[in-house]
Amino acid sequence: MKNKEVWVVGVGPMALEYAKILKDSEISVKFIGRGEKSAEIFKSETGITPHTGGLENFIHKSKEIPSHAIVAVGVSELAEQTLILL
């Protein structure tokens, strides 16, 4: 997946596990979360600064479209975040 970009939506426990795998890869990864508190925890555990403000906000500001996305949010948010990506 060289020259590909992956967006990981969510910065909670599941995203922490994805970060461990993707951190040392050659894949360009952007982690997107909502709140500052979860972003701070994510950064302190991974060394990666996630984008905050939520997925919709990030999409409106981004000029890029990812080649892939991983939705790593809680079950209650899974459908909504996936639909936003679509």
Image (cartoon, rainbow, N blue to C red):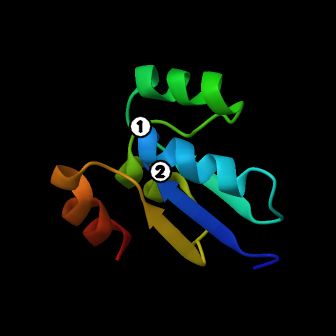
Drawn side of residue 54 relative to residue 19, left or right? left
Looking at the rendered structure, the secondary structure element under dot 2 is helix
Q: CA distance from mark 1 to mark 2?
A: 7 Å
Q: Quadrant of residue 42?
A: top right
Question: Which residue is at the front of the view, 49 or 26?
Answer: 26
Drawn side of residue 22 relative to residue 16, left or right? right
Residue 63 in view here:
no
Amino acid bearing label 2? Phe
The number of numbered discs placed on residues in the rendered structure image is: 2
- Quadrant of the image containing the N terminus: bottom right
Drawn side of residue 5 relative to residue 27, left or right? left
**Whole-percent x, y for residue 39 in the image:** 50, 29
Question: Which residue is at the front of the view, 85 or 61?
Answer: 85
The image's mark for residue 1 is none
> Image point 52% across, 23% down: which residue?
41
**Whole-percent x, y for residue 7 in the image:** 55, 61
> Image point 40% across, 52% down: which residue?
55
In contact (CB < 8 Å): disc 1 and disc 2 = yes
Question: Which residue is at the front of the view, 81 or 45?
Answer: 45
Residue 82 in view here:
yes
> Image point 34% across, 77% down: which residue?
86
The residue tagged 1 is 53
Residue furthest left in the image = 76
Q: Quadrant of residue 82?
A: bottom left
**Whole-percent x, y for residue 3 in the image:** 80, 76
- Label 1 crowd (10 A; few <14 / some 14-19 / many >=20): some
**Whole-percent x, y for residue 36 in the image:** 45, 23
Label whose residue precedes the other's in the sequence (1 or 2): 1
Q: Is residue 15 above or below residue 49?
A: below
> Image point 54% across, 21% down: which residue?
40
The image's mark for residue 58 is 2
Amino acid bearing label 1? Gly
